[in-house]
């Protein structure tokens, strides 16, 4: 399942996502992965969460490469239960126009490998299309 946190910059999505990731360790038996733009949040997350900083992978420049990168993460650890992706629009030149296909691909990965994604999007709901209704929105700042 793909779940979303939607809202403009500064609306508390990252803090919410950090809390969700830390809390998820009490609810899952498998692994938790947190993908972030940089190393800034590394020390706010519990040590058992695998933190991936995209600035270390600067040559991932589009959604196809990003999806391939996610497959690589999954292939390394078959016990992943949740992948958090913070501020997707700041990764790999992902644009709002790319989101519909990107989220659909994440949803397919989620079903195939039986894991969840939580993705934060720095945009107002009005900027996103009707496709957003296919996903569970976790916050009221939509």
Image (cartoon, rainbow, N blue to C red):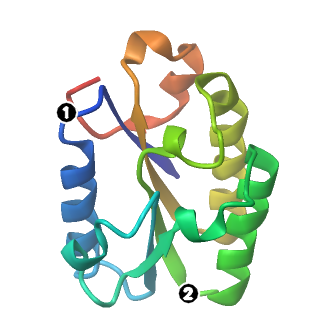
Taking the image as shown, residue 116 lies to the left or right of residue 24, namely right
Label 2: state its secondary structure. Answer: loop
Give residue 11's position: percent from left, percent from top.
19, 33
Looking at the rendered image, the disc whose residue lies closer to the viewer, 1 or 2, is 1
Mark 2 is surrounded, within 10 Å at the Cα level, by few (under 14), some (14 to 19) or many (20 or more) other residues, namely some
- Depth check: 135 or 123 in front? 123
Q: Which residue appears at 30% of the width and 25% of the height?
A: 8
Q: Which image quadrant is residue 27 in?
A: bottom left
Of callouts 1 and 2, which one flags the residue occurring earlier in the amino acid sequence?
1
Give residue 52's position: percent from left, percent from top.
50, 73
Per the image, the residue denoted by label 2 is: 79
Q: Is residue 115 visible?
A: no
Label 1: state its secondary structure. Answer: loop
Number of labelled discs?
2
Q: Which image quadrant is residue 67 in?
A: bottom right
Give residue 79's position: percent from left, percent from top.
56, 87
Per the image, the residue denoted by label 1 is: 11
Taking the image as shown, residue 128 lies to the left or right of residue 26, namely right
């Amino acid at each position: 399942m793909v779940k979303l946190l939607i809202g403009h910059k500064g609306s508390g999505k990252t803090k919410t996502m950090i809390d969700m990731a830390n809390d998820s360790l009490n609810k899952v038996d498998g692994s938790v992965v947190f993908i972030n733009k940089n190393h800034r949040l590394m020390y706010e997350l519990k040590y058992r969460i695998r933190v991936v900083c995209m600035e270390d992978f600067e040559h991932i420049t589009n959604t196809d490469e990003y999806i391939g990168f996610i497959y690589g993460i999954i292939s390394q650890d078959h016990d992943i239960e949740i992948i958090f992706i913070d501020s997707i629009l700041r990764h790999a030149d992902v644009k709002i126009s790319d989101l519909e296909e990107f989220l659909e691909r994440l949803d397919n990965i989620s079903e195939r490998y039986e894991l969840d994604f939580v993705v934060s999007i720095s945009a107002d709901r009005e900027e996103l299309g009707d496709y957003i209704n296919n996903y569970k929105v976790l916050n009221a700042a939509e």
